[in-house]
Image (spheres, rainbow, N blue to C red):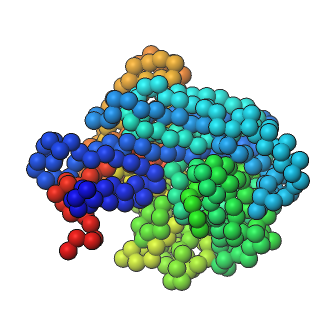
Amino acid sequence: MNRTTLSLIAGATALAAVTGFAAVSAPDPGSAEQRTGAAATLPVERTGLLCPRPSTSDLAETTYTSFAPVTEGADGKGTAVLRAAAQQSAPDDDGTSEDGKDGENGSADEKGEKDAAKDDTAGKPVLQLQEPGKPVTAEADGADAPALVGTADGRFASGWTAQQTTEVAAGTGRGLQGVACSAADTQFWFPGASTDDSRTDYIHLTNPDDSAAVVDIELYGKDGELETTVGEGITVKPRSAEPVLLSTLTAEKQTDVTVHVVVRSGRVGAAVQALDDETGGDWLPASADPSGRLVLPGIPKDATAVRLIAFTPGDADVDLKVRLASPSGLITPAGNETLHVKGGMTAAFDLGDLTRGEAGSLVLTAPDGSVPVVAAVRVLRGEGGKQESAFIPAARPVETRATALDNTAEGTTLSVTAPEGDAEIKVTASAGTKGGTPQTKTYSIKSGTTQDIEAPVPAGLKGSYALTVETRAGGPVYASRTLASTEGGVPFFTVQPLPDDRGMVAVPDASENLSVLQR
């Protein structure tokens, strides 16, 4: 094998490492991109997703949804399958997993009985796509709904997206809980968690691989890092899911906590499930990587309370400039023009009914972008004893394409912001899960604004559908999707930011040498 070929493979391998789990093939030697020496943009040919265990409530009703958009240039064959994780670790009464931190608790007979019970559902397909452009769903009731581990290849890999939406009728965390399934990684930040007595917050860790992963969990409160008792060296068994109750990791009770997950060996998927005794609950996805500029898109226009939680990992303090991207442009909230965040300490700020009946997104900026920050907002809708909560973390931009699943003709809001420049986007409503014809619309988003757009709906819709957002010009663009319904006078809702699906990758021409070995 010559050195040029090695260079191309090295580039693709490095790219796969960056994106979590992806594979691409080299371009056809006779292609135009190859002949002109330009980089070829190709569909990803293999990818993976992880979905956490949806709920511990017997009243939970969960819908899993899987979808892949039609991608030009994708392989004509392929599969996309989500399976139940091989081992499901369930919380005991004391909040620990049934297997314990190191997997050594319990007698051999007890373990054998538990493993036999798990084997009834372990590894079974839960969802399998039949064709690109049409979502599929599966339903599960109660606390037995499993965490999922999945892979997609060929024509399904590019832009493959999965979502789980759970409705809990009553009890702690009642309401609508939604989370997009994510790729495995080695580090995550979650500002907005809690160890307070009124909250039951779990960090869900899912290991997709055939070897164990070892994870450290660090907690940071208002005065700095919290002392933890069992947060280091947590073992997540192969192809298993492990929920860890945050309040069991520390004796300190704090309302606002930043969780930092660091994987020592292997890789995991991670998400925080935040459940409140009075205001329901939702999933808290990981914040975008620490940065001096953050965008938190799509705060509902009827939000009755917005609480910002921010954290800077370093020792330096920072004064964050706060602006709201409204339908008319960027504005500075009165009384909250600048927020002070101390280095290594979690800071929280009540911003009230920030949006005041209009679509809005928060834009946070550190001076000169010199101090990196992570952030999220906790949003409440409703009044008095009929409130519901959801979370919006700092999001990554939609560089090329992103998709939100489980949409319905009523109760879906797509919010898009372009904080730095005018942008044009194309939004496609897929076919429905049970019927319907795709529809597409193009929208212009003015610089500095947030728009709740009237998204297209499939003609003759039956079931739910996917909304795919593509950036056509300008930007950067950030987006989120809100699902909402009303149950017993309580405004159930959940918000998911739309990160880029990373379905396309640029593969250098074989003549471009990427090898650090070549002199």
Instruction: Residue 68: give x, y in percent of width and height.
Output: 43, 34
Quadrant where the image shows the C terminus:
bottom left
- Front in this rendered view, residue 26 or 327: 26
Instruction: From this view, report whether residue 510 is shown above or below residue 69.
Output: below
Q: Residue at x 22, y 48 (%)?
A: 40
- Front in this rendered view, residue 340 or 431: 431
Q: Dividing the picture into quarters, in which one does residue 12 lie?
A: bottom left
Instruction: Residue 397: give x, y in percent of width and height.
Output: 39, 54
Q: Residue at x 60, y 37 (%)?
A: 83
Instruction: From this view, report whether residue 203 is shown above or below residue 485.
Output: below
Instruction: Residue 227: give x, y in percent of width and height.
Output: 74, 77
Q: Residue at x 67, y 43 (%)?
A: 86
Residue 150 in sight in this render: yes
- Front in this rendered view, residue 423 or 248: 248
Q: Residue at x 42, y 58 (%)?
A: 17
Quadrant where the image shows the N terminus:
bottom left
Residue 206 in sight in this render: no
> 247 left or right of 379?
right
